[in-house]
Image: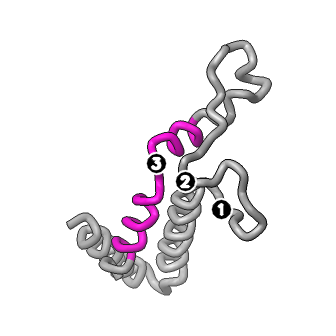
């Protein structure tokens, strides 16, 4: 499991360019709450075509990372909550920590 998760995460991270992170963090600066401050608006993403064709409708690569995080988070939560007893929940949690350590290494 750790090898599969690590490989998938690595593929997602390799698709993200620094400009994508900047865009993701600053895209709400044009909102009414931020109108009092003047910030340059970053409107481009290097990983997404500027003018998507009909066949290519990709999202920002950072959004793919966020979606992946939410999927894994939901999966981990589901695994822990569906374990029966408190002892089983501890075992599942311990197993997940072991998987996380394997991913890290």
| Residue visible at 25% across and 64% down in the picture | 104
Q: Which residue is nearer to you in this view: 71 or 59?
A: 59
> Residue 11 in magenta?
yes
Q: Is mark 2 on a helix, strand or loop?
A: loop
Q: What element carries label 1?
A: loop
- Magenta: predominant secondary structure element? helix
Q: In this view, does 17 lie to the left or right of 99?
A: right
> Can you tell which quarter of the image residue 98 is in?
bottom left
Instruction: List x then y, in percent, for residue 91.
Output: 34, 81
Q: Give the range drawn in magenta.
A: 5-25
The residue that disc 3 covers is 17
| Residue visible at 40% across and 84% down in the picture | 88
Quick one: label 2 or label 1, which is nearer the N terminus? Answer: 2
Assess whether mark 1 and mark 2 are in contact (beta carbons under 8 angstroms).
Answer: yes
Neighbourhood count class around disc 1 (C-alpha, 10 Å): few under 14, some 14–19, many 20 upward: few
| Residue visible at 45% across and 42% down in the picture | 18
Q: Is residue 98 left or right of residue 55?
A: left
The residue that disc 2 covers is 47
> Can you tell which quarter of the image residue 99 is in?
bottom left
Neighbourhood count class around disc 3 (C-alpha, 10 Å): few under 14, some 14–19, many 20 upward: some
């Amino acid at each position: 499991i750790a090898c599969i998760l690590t490989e998938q995460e690595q593929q997602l991270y390799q698709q993200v360019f620094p400009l994508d992170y900047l865009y993701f963090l600053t895209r709400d600066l044009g909102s009414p709450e931020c109108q009092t401050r003047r910030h340059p608006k970053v409107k481009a993403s290097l990983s997404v075509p500027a003018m998507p064709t009909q066949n290519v409708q990709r999202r920002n690569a950072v959004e793919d990372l966020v979606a992946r995080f939410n999927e894994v988070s939901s999966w981990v939560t589901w695994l822990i909550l569906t374990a029966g007893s408190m002892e089983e929940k501890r075992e599942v949690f311990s197993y997940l920590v072991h998987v996380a350590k394997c991913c890290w290494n």
